[in-house]
Image (cartoon, rainbow, N blue to C red):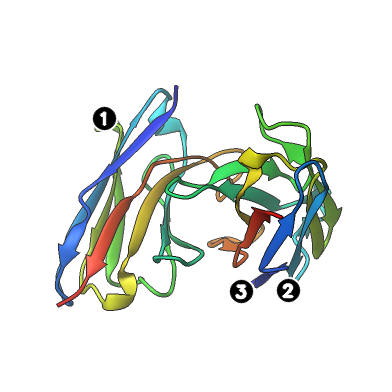
């Protein structure tokens, strides 16, 4: 099974500043036949279901503000919020969807305002 | 717009059973793979079960294999999760989710239904 490990577990960033969340997979999620990284990022606000932000490691879902970006390949990935807004306070999860018949999520990173 | 609405959660004693439902609307349900994903209170996300669009293929997490059964009724645009032999560790919010572009990439989630297993 692929284990996803996020860092840090929590962070606090000032409004307008950059927030960076890391995600490491225990094995590569890069599929060589199509050169795609099977890695997604979700945002979950209190009392709400997760919302898809980024997939294929760096493709923004429709409607997601461009201050959110994803990068990385293989086993190491990053979610960056370029200029933190108040509405970005949430828990963020990475997910690998490379394996079949299962997928796995990181433990989550709680993002707050400093 | 795409809507997924779960129902059927509640309080059940250890060893009991519960059937969750997920009503889908706003898209062609029969064309999409679906999954159940759960989240224990204050915890992370755990994939539980997958079903293919035609209902011919199902997968389960090891933690629920042999106790849970996923099914769907494409005529009723509905997804189900039959949960038997429930344990305290099954306590969680259960979400149904639609897969998009890949079997386990979830672009729409329901609001969830809470299952509490306690005596």
Mark 1 vs mark 2: in front: 2
Q: Nearer the viewer, residue B74 or A1?
A: A1
Q: Nearer the viewer, residue A108 or A72?
A: A108
Give the CA separation, mark 1 to mark 2: 41 Å
Q: Quadrant of the N terminus of chain A?
A: bottom right
Q: Earlier in the sequence, mark 3 or mark 2?
A: 3
Q: Are marks 1 and 2 on the same chain?
A: no
In the rendered image, the vertical position of residue A100 relative to residue A81, given as above or below? below
| Residue B95 in sight | yes
Mark 1 vs mark 3: in front: 3
Which residue is located at x 75 percent, y 54 percent?
A13
Residue A60: image x %, image y %?
A: 73, 36
Which residue is located at x 73 percent, y 74 percent?
A26
Q: Residues within 10 Å of mark 1 (few under 14, many from 20)?
A: few
Q: Which residue is mark 1?
A: B75
Whether residue B2 sits left or right of residue B94 in the image: it is right
Q: Which residue is mark 3?
A: A1
Residue A61: image x %, image y %?
A: 67, 34
Q: Quadrant of the C terminus of chain A?
A: bottom right
Q: Which residue is mark 2?
A: A26
The chain that hosts pointer 3 is A
Residue B19: image x %, image y %?
A: 20, 55
| Residue A97 in sight | no
Q: Nearer the viewer, residue A101 or B42?
A: B42
């Amino acid at each position: 099974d692929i284990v996803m490990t996020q860092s840090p577990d929590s962070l606090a960033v000032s409004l307008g500043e950059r927030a960076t969340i890391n995600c490491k997979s225990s094995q590569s999620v890069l599929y060589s036949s199509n050169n795609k990284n099977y890695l997604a990022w979700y945002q979950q606000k209190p009392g709400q279901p997760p919302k898809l932000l980024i997939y294929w490691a760096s493709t923004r879902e429709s409607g997601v503000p461009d201050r959110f970006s994803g990068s990385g390949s293989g086993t190491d990935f990053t979610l960056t919020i370029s200029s933190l807004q108040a509405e970005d306070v949430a828990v963020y999860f990475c997910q690998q969807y490379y394996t079949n018949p299962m997928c796995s999520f990181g433990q989550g990173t709680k993002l707050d305002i400093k | 717009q795409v809507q997924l609405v779960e129902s059927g959660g509640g309080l059940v004693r250890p060893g009991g059973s519960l059937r969750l439902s997920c009503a889908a609307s706003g898209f062609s349900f029969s064309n999409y793979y679906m999954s159940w994903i759960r989240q224990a209170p204050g915890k992370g996300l755990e994939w539980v079960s997958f079903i293919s669009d035609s209902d011919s293929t199902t997968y389960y997490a090891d933690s629920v294999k042999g106790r849970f059964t996923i099914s769907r009724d494409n005529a009723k645009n509905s997804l189900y999760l039959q949960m038997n032999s429930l344990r305290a560790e099954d306590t969680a919010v259960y979400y149904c989710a639609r897969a998009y572009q890949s079997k386990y990439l979830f672009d729409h989630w329901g609001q969830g239904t809470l299952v509490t297993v306690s005596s």
